[in-house]
Amino acid sequence: MSLLEVTDLMAGYGPAKVLHGMTFAVDEGEIATILGANGAGKTTTLRAICGMVATSGGIRFDGRSVRGLAPARMARLGVAHVPQGRGTFAGLTVRENLLAGAYTRRDRAGVAADIDRISQWFPRLAERRDQPAGSLSGGEQQMLAVSRALLLRPRLLLLDEPSLGLAPLVTQSLFGTLTDIHNQMGTTMLIVEQNAGLALRIAHRAFVLEAGRIVRAGDAASVAADDSVRRAYLGLGDSR
Amino acid sequence: MTYFLQQVVDGVSTGVIYALLGLAMVLIFRATGIINFAQGELATIAAFFAWQLNLWGLPIWLAIAATAVIGFGAGAAIERVVIRPVANKDHFTLIMVTLGLFMITNAVTGLVWGYTIQAFPDPFPVAAWTVHGVSLSLASVGTIVIVCVVGFLLYQLFHRTRLGLGMRAAISNPESARLSGIDVGRMQMIGWGLAAMVGTLAGALAAPKLFLEPNMMLGVLTYAFAAVIVGGLDSPLGAVVGGLAIGVTENLAGAYLYDFVGNDLKIAVPLALVFGILLVRPQGLFGRRAVARA
C-alpha cells in the first residue's frame, strides 16, 4: 500500500489556482522526486500535503485522510518538511535547532542518539553546535534544516529544492548524505528539485509536473531515459 | 557619599518596577513580535482588580496571586481575540491595535473604579534597616528580590524547558516551528498570558508607591519602554538592567541636577542617556543583532 496517496489535488493561493487535479502516490521506503519547470507547482504540492495552503481533492497518509490538517498536526503524524530556503531557527543555536525539531518527541535517550547519528552525517554541525544557526553558511543551514526535520523521526520527509543556492560540491555531498540516510533509516522521501539529473540519480520513482498536472510518472530510470524529459529538464539532446 | 548611596538605592527601588513592566513587554515581543503599548494600562487594571479583591476581604498577597492567575487567562484571551486577527498585518496596524487596547483598558478602569485616588495596601510590612547610614525599607528590598526571582524563573523557562524552546522557535521562524509540530498559536497565547502575569506583579508593586488611579502607570510605561529599548527588545536581562539604569539615573538627576533640570525635567535625563546608548548600540545593550549570512 502506498504511504502517501494524492488524488485529484487542487490547490492555490486565493483565486489563483496552481494545482489542477494532481494524482500520484509514493510507496513506503522509496525516494520519489517531482520534476518540473519553475512555476509548475512543485513547491505548492509539498505545501498542500502539509496543510500550508487551501486544497481540495484527496490526500491520504498511511491510509487515513489528512487533507486540511494543520502543519503542526501533520508533523505529529510523522510528515517532516524542509521548506525552500530558510528552514532553520536563526536566533537559536545549532543544538537548540535540533531539539526544536524533536519537539514532539518524549524519548530523551532516542533524541540524544539521533543527534549523535546526525553529527556523524554532518560533522560540520557538531563543530558548530553552540553557534546561532543564522551565522552558518548556506550549505550548513541546509544541512541543519534537513537534520532538524530528521529529528522528528519522520515516516515521510518532504524536501523542497534542497540544492537551491548551494555550490555544486556541497549539493553533491548533501545528496550523497540523503542516500546514506535513506539506506540506514529507510525514510520515505519526496524531493522537489530543479537539478533533475541529481534528483533522478538517487530517486526510485519520478513524476513530471507541468502547469499543475502530472504528465509523466514512472520509475526514475525510465523517466530519465525519456527523450522529452531529457530535452526539457536534463538539458540534453535525444538519447540516440 | 551616604547621600549618593541613598539616592542610588532609592533609584534601584523605582527601577525594579520599570524592569518588571519592561519584562512583560519583552515577553510579548518575544512571543508575537509586537510592542505592547497597553502593558501599563493592563497592569493598572490588574492592580485595581487586586485592590478590589482585597477590599472584599482577601489578604493582599492572596489577592495579588489570584489576580496574577486571572491575568494569565486574560492575557491569553487578549492575544486570541484582539491580536491574532491582525497578527499578519503590518507594524503600524499592530501599534494602532495596542494603542486602542491602551485607551479601552484605561477607559474601562475609570468607568468601573472612578478617577478618585485610592490607597493600595502595602504588601510588605513597614520596616527598615539602616546600613552605613543608608536607609533600606523592607518594601524596597522585597520588591528587588521579587524582580530577581521573576527574572531568574523566566530565564530558566526560556532556556531550560521544552516549552521555552518551543516559544523561542515559534518567534524565530513560525513556519519551521509549525513544521516541527510546535503549536505556534498556543505559544503566542502563553507568551501574552505570562506577560499579563508579570504585568500584574508590576502594577501591584507600583501601586503602594504611586497611589491607585487609572493613569497610575503612564509614567512607568514610558520608562519601561525606554528600559526595554536600551536593554534590547528581546532580552529579559536587558529589561532588568535597563530598568535599573533608568531608575538610578532619574533619581540621581533629581538629586544633583535639581537646580538645572528641576523636578519636572528630570524625566529627560534618562531618556537622553537612552538616546546616547542607542547611537552606539542600536540593538540595545543585550539585544541580539539579527545575524544573517547571505
Image: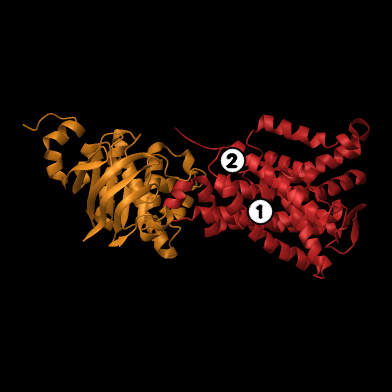
Chain colours: A orange, B red
- The local secondary structure at tag 1 comes to helix
User: Alpha-carbon neighbours of circle 1 within 10 Å: few (<14), some, or many (≥20)?
Assistant: many
Q: Earlier in the sequence, mark 1 or mark 2?
A: 1
- The local secondary structure at tag 2 comes to loop
Q: Position of residue A217 (x, y in %)?
A: 17, 45
Q: Position of residue B182 (x, y in %)?
A: 47, 55
Q: Position of residue A43 (x, y in %)?
A: 33, 42
Residue in the image at 55% along x and 47% along y: B85
Disc 1/disc 2 C-alpha distance (Å): 20 Å
**Residue ID for mark 2:** B288
Snapshot quadrant of residue A2: bottom left
Q: Nearer the viewer, mark 1 or mark 2?
A: 1
User: Alpha-carbon neighbours of circle 2 within 10 Å: few (<14), some, or many (≥20)?
Assistant: few
Q: Which mark is residue A68?
A: none
- Left or right, B193 with respect to B147, comes to left
User: What subunit carries mark 1?
Assistant: B
Quarter that holds the N terminus of chain B: top right
| Residue B165 shows up from this direction | no
- Left or right, B153 with respect to B249, comes to left
Snapshot quadrant of residue B150: bottom right
- Left or right, B80 with respect to A148, comes to right
The kind of residue tagged 2 is Arg
- Pick out the residue farthest to the left: A240
User: What subunit carries mark 2?
Assistant: B
Residue in the image at 83% along x and 46% along y: B11
Residue in the image at 47% along x and 43% along y: A133
**Residue ID for mark 1:** B195
The kind of residue tagged 1 is Ala
